[in-house]
Image: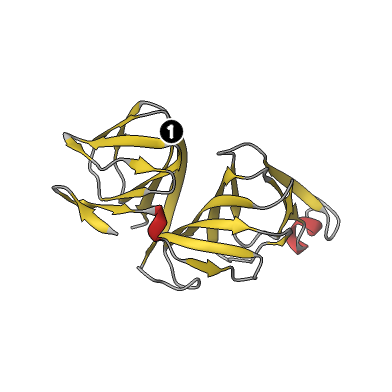
Amino acid sequence: MADVGSLTNVTLIRGADLVAAPWKNGGGVTREVAAVPEQAGLDSFVWRVSIADVAQAGPFSRFAGIDRTLVLLSGAGMLLDEIAGPERVAAGEAASGGVVKTHALTQPLDIARFAGETPIDARLVDGATRDFNLMVRRGAARGEVDVWRGATQHVLSADVVLLYCADGAVAVSLGDWAAPPLATGDTLRINAPDALHCAVQGTGALLAIRLHYER
């Protein structure tokens, strides 16, 4: 991880430099891309972005008070079943232990959004998957994830913006400054962009993550 070029609020995070660590529940491996505070534990982050290799079916770890966004990066995909808890049973949405809703991530860059306290059972379609994971502490920050494909232009305004290269290779310009080329797995982190013009060239795909702190 290093500051790049003449923009000191921009950091390049190479995918090859990410460190693998076992999941909280042991069902896979995660690689942290960025978090606030830096090196925060799973119980203390404001937001956290990571890449997960899901090796087996089973329940997701519970993260109370966390809003989650999951994006399929590779593999045949998975089905995320929301399991009825006491509140949903009381509301008549489903019987205890029944499936209330299924998020189908079966195509690259499919997105699922759900609350971290929601009981989730994951079913793998055909073997292991790799996924992009955004977790944001509710009441402390808000996060948005969009998919950008190919050549495109945007105006960036947020407390933090992350541009994650999900597939292929892209060239990114911020204002009149050209960032180093991004390959699959690389990320640009831009702190406090204020109506910063962003132009993307190439045939790859980016995940654009905008983070806003609650004040």
Q: Residue 14 at x, y = what percent?
A: 36, 53
* Residue furthest right as drawn: 95
Q: Where is the N terminus found, in terms of image quarters?
A: bottom left
Who's the residue at 30% across and 40% down the image? 181
> Which residue is identified by label 1?
204
Compared with residue 214, is residue 150 higher up or lower down, i.e. above or below?
above
* Residue furthest left as drawn: 6
Compared with residue 199, is residue 49 higher up or lower down, i.e. above or below?
below
Three-letter residue code for mark 1: Gly
Image-based side of 208 in relation to 74, left or right:
left
How many numbered circles does the render carry? 1
Label 1 element class: loop
Q: Is residue 112 visible?
A: yes
Q: How is the image coloured?
A: secondary structure
Who's the residue at 25% across and 58% down the image? 2
Q: Residue 47 at x, y = what percent?
A: 43, 60
Give residue 27's quadrant in the image: bottom right
Give residue 44's quadrant in the image: bottom left
Who's the residue at 44% across and 65% down the image? 19
* Residue furthest front as drawn: 16
Image-based side of 157 in relation to 133, left or right:
left
